[in-house]
Structures are given as C-alpha cells and as structure tokens.
Amino acid sequence: HGVIITHAAFNPRARAAARPAASAAAAARAVAATPAARAATAAAAAQPIDLSFRSEIFSITKTITALLFARYLDEHRVALVESVGAILPDWPRDPKHVPTSRECFTHTNGLSGHGDFGGAANPYFDNVVLNGIDANSAATHYEYSGMGFDLAAKAMEIIAGKSAMRLYHDELFAPLGIGDVPMTSASAGAKPTALQLAILGQLLANHGSYGRVRRFSAATFRALLPQNLAR
C-alpha cells in the first residue's frame, strides 16, 4: 500500500504552525495542582526505587535499538556501510539522499525529529520517509534525531519478517531472560524496570554477553564504537 503525504509534513514552518493548536489541546486536559495533589506526588517521590520500578528512559531507548542491531551485524545480516536502500523495498541507493546503517545511528542521516509519522510502530514508516527522500541530504551534517533509529528498525523488520516491537522481545529481551519491556518506538519511550535496565547495561559492559548468554561478539562491539566521522 502506498502512503501519500503533503510537503507540509517535511516543512518545519508548517509543523511550527500546528504547535499552538496542540498546546491548546494539552491545556484543556490540564489538572489543577492542589496542595493535596502536590503532597501525594511528594510522598510518592520519597519512596525508594526497587528492582521492579519501571520508568520511561527516553533516549536511552536508542541504545536498546543499537543492542538489537548489533545482533544483526554480528550475524552478517546487515552491514554498517551498507545503504538502507539495499534493504528497504523500492528505496534507491543514492548516497546523497539515502543513509547507510552507520549514518542512521550517528545522527548524520539528514532526517530530523523524534517519533514523526509514528516511528517504527507505523508499518508504513519507511514508505512515508521514502516519499520525501529526494529532499534529504545524508552524511552532510550532524543533527540529533530519532528518525535514523526508526529507519534502522524498519530495515531489521524487512530482514526478519517480524515487526520491530516483536524483534526486541524475541531477539533481545527473551534470550536475556528479562521478560517484556514496553516499547513504543526505536528512539524513545522504552519502559524497563530498574533490573531490566541493569541487565541491558551489563550486556553492554560485557561487550555482548550476559552470564552464559552471548548476543554479539566483542569484535562487533568494537565496530559499533564511535569513529571520527570527519575523516
């Protein structure tokens, strides 16, 4: 199925014009902060955090996506220097407009925004971005963004034949024995417990292993380390 979007979707001024309406809608849903409500919030904040405490980790979600991607890289199902156009259906491989996998993870893919167009949870996300890819400039500048992570997640979907949200569970969380971690996109919104986050951190600290489970090699870990992109 094709997805048709207007030029305004890629136009920052058009997005800015829509913000007042969104702000008004948020204000309409606001709840007055009474003394009792503030006291209840303060009491909750005073409680110690145990291992089952679950919280949104915002952009640390990007690291979880990188851990999943490391498995694909380790199994040679994808390459860092390969254009995502080699994986995504109907995409060109023009390096001027289409980023490589490494550029998706280093904020040099040319795309801007976080969770735009529904992110990786939108089954047509890659098609939406494709409609404006000829206006994109890849590998020309750094811009902090979540869109490259969502695009990489869609590439993993195509390779595996499963939704990205399912891949996080089947190829990362379940093998580590940590249960389910609520995910809404590939760049933000993950809500692990304190213990789940600690285990994912230990997987990273151990360069791909946790206990007797190895998800990717130390060589793959080194390949994913930052490089001088100016060279």
Image: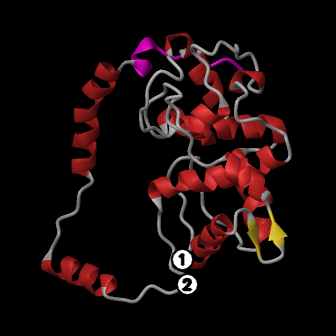
Nearer to us in this view, 101 or 51: 101
Image quadrant holding the C terminus, namely top right
- The residue tagged 1 is 194
Q: Residue furthest left?
A: 35
Which type of secondary structure does the marked residue at label 1 adopt?
Answer: helix
The answer for how far apart the CA atoms under marks 1 and 2 are is 5 Å
Circles 1 and 2: CB atoms closer than 8 Å:
yes
Under circle 2, the secondary element is: loop
Label 1 Cα crowd, 10 Å radius (few <14 / some 14-19 / many 20+): some
> At 63% across and 50% down in the image, what residue appears?
65
Q: Quadrant of the N terminus?
A: top right
Report which residue position mark 2 lands on.
51
- Give the magenta-colored segment's residue range: 1-10
Residue 124: tell me if it is visible: no
Q: Main secondary structure of the magenta part?
A: loop
In the rendered image, residue 181, in percent from the top left (x then y), is placed at: 63, 65
Q: Residue type at mark 1?
A: Ala
Image vertical order of residue 16 relative to residue 197, above or below? above
Figure check: 92 above or below 186: above
Instruction: Give the residue type that dot 2 points to.
Output: Leu
Task: Please state which of residues 123 and 217 is positioned toward the viewer in this rendering.
Answer: 217
Q: Which mark is residue 42?
A: none
- The residue at the point 55 percent across, 59 percent down is 190
Left or right: 229 in relation to 121: left
Identify the residue at image location x=77%, y=44%: 73
Outermost residue toward the front in this view: 231
The colouring scheme, among rainbow, by chain, secondary structure or one colour, is secondary structure
Q: Quadrant of residue 32?
A: bottom left
Note whether residue 96 is visible.
yes
> Quadrant of residue 125 in the image?
top right
Q: Is residue 73 magenta?
A: no
Please tell me how crowded label 2 is: few (under 14), some (14-19), or many (20+) other residues with Cα within 10 Å. Answer: few
